[in-house]
Image (spheres, helix red, strand yellow):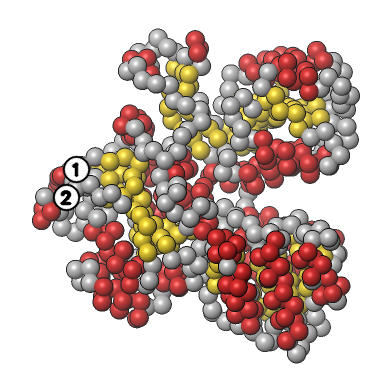
């Protein structure tokens, strides 16, 4: 790809379709776009934009209100710098999110964007190229490609995919450089897999073999799984077959299917998923594979993977086998390792995880001692944690002194709280708690997490940790309000006028994020609720800005008086924590 004559002067079209809000254009964001320009042109670019914020359109609005899309896109395109020779339209959130929610340039919404691009190009007097960043470039017959074909052929529109593909085609060196920029911005897929790994604690029955304490799943990490599986299977020879045993763990199927399609091609047999050895034999009954790759969600005792190996060796004694597990309860390293099994068997794995086995007759086998129902592998949503579940987690993370206590509470009250930070980070339950908390709002907020805005206090360890898990694992959008603003409204006795004065006098980053939001319905979130004073202050601020609070989310509700709008993972009153005025 050749840039315009001289140094590229670029601006970024600040419109985002498919998100309630996105991060501001800070130095990190700008550095990504500088790197992208350098990768695609081979020379440094000069940013000529201003400090305006993003205009966001939620998925729901985009699908139902086409004219809104056109209006917002037109305004965003028109407000770009007239000096720019390159306008970057970023339709993939990979550059802005740890947990990307990608928007493909397809469908009626993207046709409207394409029309606005054409109109902008017609209106610009000087040479200008619109560079559209995508997760993947649509095929030539796609209606958007057809609508933009003249501009693409003339080099005034360039479509660039995360994999370096482009229309019109670009030099392989530039393509490779751009792929490296995207990989660097996305981060290490194995680290992201670990961050999104849902680790549920319970009593999962193994029949007469007793119980295991943990169940793992990665249904929220499809993109990262796809990338890692593609990397691991990319050297399979022509004619290879991929088979997969999932049992009741279905989260592996979709990313493995997409990886197989990319590695083996559309004409290959695809993945043979099986639940029994008979199904495996039937799936390969007429096969003549050059190699067989076995992919499973997890290897624990290795009994199942050995049985699969023995069956395949009996069916194809001379065919090479490759064994890959996403998770393994043993192995020499935390990530990207190889586990040695008896008989010279080797299983590659992506992540090592912990597993605890408890015999039925063990003195600490609560499932047998307390006679409660076994934990279900497929967890139903929309329910708080049961008392045993909550206190079982606290046994892992010992209670600690309360962090960020209110000013009126004496320091010597001895108020102990669950160590939520250790629970979410050190013990790895953050993704599970985030998913459970999100499910409490199922049907009460926007259907898509990326269309949902959660607002919480800023700079408080537990709230920040919970917000990070919600953003990374679930994909909701987070805005943090500084404690100083919350306390200002508290001191003013929750006066709407005091909150409006904040909006009139302040242009802090959190306010800019809220102003640029494509969503007016929000959820307030905190780690605990006791008196609801902070919640009330945040509500006052949000309502002064024209937002509608649809609920309150927290890990634990300690309120003396029940509040129906609070949805907590666990609730029990703690009068000793309440404001003396409210007792």
Q: Which residue is drawn at 45% across and 49% down?
A: 443
Callout 2: few (<14), some (14-19), or many (20+) C-alpha neighbours within 10 Å?
some
Instruction: Describe residue 486's horizontal placement relative to residue 204 as left or right.
Output: left
Residue 396, quarter of the rendered image: top left
Residue matched to label 2: 578
Residue 88, quarter of the rendered image: bottom right
* Above/below status of 419 relative to 207: below
Note whether residue 352 is visible.
Answer: yes
Q: Residue at x 41, y 60 (%)?
A: 522
Q: Which residue lies furthest to the bottom in this view?
A: 125
Image position, residue 380 (x, y; %): 46, 34
| Camera-nearest residue between 26 and 337 | 26
**Which disc number belongs to residue 476?**
none
Q: Quadrant of the N terminus?
A: bottom right
* Above/below status of 239 relative to 146: above
* Above/below status of 353 relative to 497: above
Q: Which residue is drawn at 32% across and 18% down?
A: 370
Callout 1: few (<14), some (14-19), or many (20+) C-alpha neighbours within 10 Å?
few
| Camera-nearest residue between 390 and 47 | 390
Instruction: Describe residue 572's horizontal placement relative to residue 31 as left or right.
Output: left
Image position, residue 188 (x, y; %): 63, 49
Residue matched to label 1: 574
Q: Which residue is drawn at 20% across and 42% down?
A: 573
Q: Are marks 1 and 2 in contact (CB under 8 Å)?
A: yes
Image position, residue 7 (x, y; %): 75, 81
* Above/below status of 570 relative to 76: above
Q: What element carries label 2?
A: loop
Image position, residue 243 (x, y; %): 75, 28
| Camera-nearest residue between 266 and 442 | 442
């Amino acid at each position: 790809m050749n840039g315009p004559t001289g140094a590229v002067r670029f601006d970024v079209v600040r419109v985002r379709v498919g998100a309630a809000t996105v991060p501001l254009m800070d130095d990190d964001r700008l550095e990504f776009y500088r790197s992208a320009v350098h990768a695609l042109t081979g020379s440094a670019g000069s940013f000529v934009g201003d400090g305006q914020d993003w205009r966001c359109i939620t998925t729901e609005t985009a699908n139902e209100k086409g004219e809104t899309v056109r209006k917002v896109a037109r305004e965003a395109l028109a407000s770009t710098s007239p000096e720019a020779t390159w306008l970057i339209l970023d339709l993939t959130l990979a550059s802005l999110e740890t947990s990307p929610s990608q928007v493909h340039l397809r469908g009626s919404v993207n046709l409207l964007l394409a029309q606005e691009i054409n109109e902008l190009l017609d209106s610009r007097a000087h040479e200008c190229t619109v560079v559209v960043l995508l997760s993947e470039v649509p095929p030539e017959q796609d209606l958007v490609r057809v609508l933009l074909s003249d501009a693409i052929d003339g080099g005034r529109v360039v479509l660039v995919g995360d994999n370096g593909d482009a229309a019109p085609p670009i030099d392989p060196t530039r393509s490779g450089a751009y792929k490296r920029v995207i990989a660097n911005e996305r981060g290490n897929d194995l680290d992201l897999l670990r961050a999104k790994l849902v680790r549920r604690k319970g009593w999962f029955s193994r029949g007469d073999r007793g119980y295991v304490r943990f169940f793992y799943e990665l249904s929220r990490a499809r993109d990262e799984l796809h990338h890692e599986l593609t990397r691991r299977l990319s050297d399979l020879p022509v004619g290879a077959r991929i088979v997969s045993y999932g049992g009741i763990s279905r989260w592996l199927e979709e990313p493995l299917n997409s990886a197989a399609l990319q590695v083996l091609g559309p004409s290959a047999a695809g993945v043979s998923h099986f639940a029994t050895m008979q199904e495996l034999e039937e799936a390969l009954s007429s096969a003549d594979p050059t190699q067989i790759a076995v992919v499973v969600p997890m290897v624990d005792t290795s009994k199942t993977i050995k049985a699969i190996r023995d069956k395949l060796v009996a069916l194809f004694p001379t065919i090479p086998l490759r064994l890959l597990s996403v998770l393994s309860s043993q192995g020499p390293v935390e990530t990207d390792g190889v586990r040695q099994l008896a008989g010279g068997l080797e299983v590659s794995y992506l992540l090592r995880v912990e597993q605890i086995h408890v015999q039925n007759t063990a003195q600490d086998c609560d499932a047998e001692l307390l006679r409660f129902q076994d934990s279900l592998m497929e967890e139903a949503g929309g329910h708080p944690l049961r008392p045993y579940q909550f206190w079982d987690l606290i046994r892992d993370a010992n209670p600690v002194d309360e962090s960020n206590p209110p000013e009126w509470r004496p320091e010597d009250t001895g108020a102990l709280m669950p160590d939520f930070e250790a629970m979410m980070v050190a013990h790895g339950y953050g993704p599970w708690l985030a998913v459970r908390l999100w499910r409490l709002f199922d049907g009460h907020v926007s259907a898509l997490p990326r269309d949902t805005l959660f607002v919480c206090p800023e700079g408080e360890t537990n709230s920040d940790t919970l917000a990070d898990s919600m953003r990374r694992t679930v994909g909701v959008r987070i805005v943090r309000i500084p404690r100083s603003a919350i306390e200002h409204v508290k001191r003013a006795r929750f006066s709407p006028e005091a909150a409006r004065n904040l909006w009139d006098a302040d242009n802090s980053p959190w306010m800019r994020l809220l102003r640029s939001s494509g969503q007016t319905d929000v959820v307030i979130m905190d780690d605990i609720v006791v008196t609801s004073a902070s919640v009330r202050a945040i509500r006052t601020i949000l309502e002064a800005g024209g937002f509608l609070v649809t609920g309150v989310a927290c890990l634990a509700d300690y309120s003396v008086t029940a509040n129906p709008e609070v949805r907590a993972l666990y609730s029990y009153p703690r009068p000793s924590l309440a404001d003396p005025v409210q007792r």
